Amino acid sequence: MRVTEPADTTPESPRREGLMARVAALEREKAELLSLCAELQTRTLKLESDNKQLAEKASWLERRVSSVDNADLWGLRQPQEQPKPKSRLLSFGGSSRRR
């Protein structure tokens, strides 16, 4: 039968105090990293939402632009001949203008 030494659990142990301080520092660092991860996830979701909206707007603009001919865009297209409006015949009784 083998005899083992009991673990040093006295709070005065410098090694134990050093390890406990290191564990506490690592726990604080872990909490900070988890907080940063949560913030990054929130920002990522916001950016993905913004990106989706911008893609939808870009698609809409592309459809709008593709429906406009370049000549129309720059005002180079000659207007088509429009029939001139026929003058209205004066109704019986003369014009509406006072004499």
Image (cartoon, helix red, strand yellow):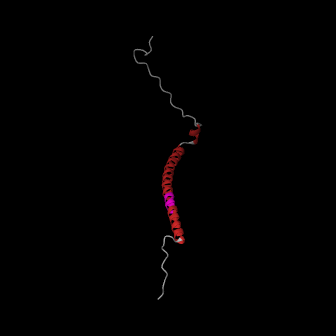
Q: Is residue 71 left or right of residue 5?
A: right
The residue positioned 49% from the left and 75% from the top of the image is: 8
The residue positioned 52% from the left and 62% from the top of the image is: 29
Q: Residue furthest top?
A: 99
Which residue occupies the foreground of this view, 98 or 66? 66
Which residue occupies the foreground of this view, 81 or 39? 39
Q: Is residue 35 left or right of residue 75?
A: left
Return the x and y of residue 97 as percentages of the image width and height. Answer: 45, 15
**Quadrant into which the C terminus falls:** top left
- Report the span colored magenta: 30-36
Main secondary structure of the magenta stretch? helix
Above-or-below relation of 85 to 67: above
Above-or-below relation of 88 to 70: above
Which residue occupies the foreground of this view, 90 or 43? 43
Return the x and y of residue 13 as percentages of the image width and height. Answer: 52, 72
Return the x and y of residue 4 as percentages of the image width and height. Answer: 49, 83
Q: Residue furthest left?
A: 92
Residue 34 within the magenta-colored segment of the rendering: yes
